[in-house]
Amino acid sequence: MEKNLALLAFVLLVAACSEAPDSANTNSLPRAEPSISETNTEITNGSRTAGYSNNRNAYFGDLHVHTMYSFDAFIFGTTSSPNDAYEFAKGGVITHPAGFDMQLQVPLDFYGVTDHATYIGVLRAMADPNSDVSSHPMAEGMDRLDASATPEERGAKFREVLEFLRTPEANAVNDPNIRRSAWADIIATANRHNDPGNFTAFIGYEYTATTPDRGNLHRNVIFRGDSAPELPLSRTDTINPEDLWDWMDANREQGFESLAIPHNSNGSNGAMFALTDTSGRPLDDAYSDQRMRNEPLVEITQVKGTSDTHPALSPNDEWADFEIMPLRIATNLYSEPNGSYVRQAFLNGLKLQAEQGFNPFKFGVIGSSDSHNATYAGEEHDYWSKVGLRDSDGVLRGSVPLPEPTADGERYTDTYFDTWSAAGLAGVWAEENTRESIYDAFRRKETFGTSGTRMKVRFFGGYDLPSADDEDMIAKAYAGGVPMGGDLINEEGASPSFIAWIAKDPNGADLERLQIIKGWAEGGEIREEIYDIACSGGDVNPTTHRCPDNGARVDISDCTITDGVGAAELKSGWQDPDYDPEQHALYYVRGLENPTCRWSTWDAIRAGVEPNPDLYPTIQERVWSSPIWITPSQ
Amino acid sequence: MPGIILKQPLFWFIGIGALLFFADNQLADTRNEIIINDALRSRLSALWTTQTGLTASEAELDALTDNWLREEVMYQEALRLGLDQEDSIVRRRLIQKLGFIAESEPLPAPKEGDVESFYQSNIENYTLPIRYSFQHKYFRTIATAETALTQITSGTPAQNFGEASMLNPSYAYRSALDLNATFGVGFANNIASLPEGSWQGPVQSGFGFHLILINTIHPEQVTPLNLIEEQVFQDFQRSRQLQTRDAYIENLLEEYRVIVETQ
């Protein structure tokens, strides 16, 4: 008897320690009323929708969103379904597990729910007493995952499940029937919400592979059509991304066209853009072909940091230190920058092209959020981060001080959430808002990424471009050149012309400057140079290639910004002053907004405290275009 | 000093243990029997097979049964001591289980005319909003926009005015939502009061100022049911699922006497 009581006392202690205030979680019910846009079916002639334009329209979307079917999102407290996710994208309101409402100021044009294929729907099923997997010991922990669990418990459970899922024993819960039913719901929901001309819903999922040392090799797979294979390929099938490409190639033969978008290369510890394949062999022509056939795009920014470049890789780029997330994903381990950033991959690709005749890193770029709350998460002033109840307020994400400093004198929660970013939108130039038109833009790489702002960027290169101010510039540029994502073969040593053009987010700050980033390979080395080509105040200094300071400032006590400085649009024709016809080169556009408050500063203002001095108080929101590649004539 | 004692796990361990011992003595001896039979053993055996893919040997099954018994006796004792009471985790878990059961009831097939009447009573969800088809001229400053308007009004062709921008020169069938997305939040309100057929403005946007010529204001338009039958059916099903759950809770509430005590 005493022995039993001693055990009970221990159990009680544990229970008492894990007790937390009960908070309401009211978003578990599906929303009954469809939003207006869901019914907004245009009746048009022929197969073209009302917004069709030969000059192509810019559309904004998020191709990286997790719902309750993702094992980790479920642990984080997310009960929102794919249906809720699409309702949100179209402008509807859904409730965060912490109880507050989430709504977009401006709805998105396209959206892709991308739940982790691995154990898709399984953790949710573990909480369902009618399911077989609910009797698995791992399911026991699932009862801590209601709204009463603390963020620490969620974090602990996340790590526990993550470790468990890496073991062979995890196969026992990986019930294919559960996965098939979740996947079927994801497909049906995307098809139901897809509304040609108004809103595009892509079928997709995340393939979540890692290297043995936890380097991130994650990809999102996006399907073009309204159907997909019976089950998505997951990390339990293979942790080798080359197998994913084989699977995609085989699917293509069966009529399932798809592409994969790598993300968080920043957390790959050098693996995402390594110069060897998975088995350690040097890259070759066949590898390059297969990678490019399946991976025409890369995610350049998201909540877990920006992967354009790193200050250690681009020491002469004053804007390189931007939303850097220095760790391997879901760990506290440092991620080696070399091999982990997109710009360096672009340059290494050029070098391979020059020296060996193939380029495995010829990507277009997009941004996306990677939200695990079913909702886009890119607004600085309305930020809810992305892992449910683990980072739902300023204290949890390190922007607002703890009520009391810790025993070690730490004033803020010790967390990597403070390295995260309110970020990530995908932009495309497409004729109309349909799956086919937008997907084809992905394939052409006529895409751009933004840090969350809805800035637009146009970029053309060619030997027969009109003047940048020509009234019919867009049509003539398409006729006489290539848009972003395209290739130019050098014509008889002639220097190509470029036209770059950015427009501000109509609900955001004015523009500061327009830049072209050039990369090239020379004498076995990779090189880069940043050219400012249009300024919102004054002219570019021809020696330094820099704009003067336009005087825009942020008052971080209330986030007001200097009025009347900055531009609504910046546009310029440009020729490379250092052009060398022998070089393999690429050019891409970066557009910068005037500085504004970062999410962490908004958090602090709302809490009535000083911003965390260890975090940047402001941010320069930006847009990156896909590159245009120049190949010397043979 | 008392603070240090209160932080000692041993203090709490002994204290709570003593309380439980006291509580145990006060309770009648109403312990249930714990039955171990073949049904239990084959359930444990099947679970082992699901988890490991292997068949449990006799020795393994004995160990599993022994482990089950140790857990079961703790579980029964915890129930007997009422440890499940007022426990928010247990409460939440039971609610979740009942919710799954309530939702697992299959929906009966809809009757003739059900979808039609759902469509009619939710017609606002199947109605296109007011939309605008218009041309515009863009100006960075309000002064240049006003000057241009004066000249256009006095007969100068509108094509002579406006500054280049990434915006399209004209837009067709744009809802308020579309307009705010393209021109900035608030823009739709600014043009809602403009008449058709003449250049008006300046209207402010996120980019600057615009002169607007509205060609047509398209009124609200109901989408015929036959074009969106499948979608309406899905909405109907979703709404019935919600109703089923609400009705389940309503029925339960009728079985309970709810007393609201006021101070």
Image (cartoon, helix red, strand yellow):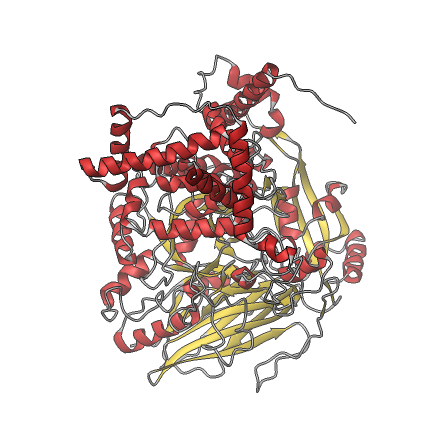
The answer to which of B9 and A542 lies nearer the viewer is: B9
Residue found 69% across the figure and 57% down from its top: B138
Displayed quadrant of residue A594 = bottom right
Rendered location of residue A149, percent (x, y): 53, 44
Q: Work out whether residue A118 or residue B188 is closer to the camera in this orientation and state it.
A: A118
- Locate residue A278 relative to residue A58 in the image: left or right: left
Q: Position of residue A504 (x, y in %)?
A: 63, 61
- Number of marks present in the image shown: 0
User: Residue furthest toward the top?
Assistant: B112
Q: Position of residue A408 (x, y in %)?
A: 59, 67
Left or right: residue A561 compared with residue A142:
right
Q: Quadrant of the C terminus of chain A?
A: bottom left
Quarter of the N terminus of chain A within the rendering: top left
x, y percentage for residue A565? 72, 69
Q: Is residue B134 above or below residue A209?
A: above
Report whether residue A139 is seen: yes
Q: Is residue A194 visible?
A: no
Residue at horizontal 24 percent and vertical 46 percent from the top: A253
Q: In terms of depth relative to the viewer, which is nearer, A538 or A275?
A: A275
Residue A231 sits above or below residue A423 on the image = above
In the image, taking residue A342 as reference, residue A456 lies left or right, namely: right
Which image quarter: residue B217?
top right
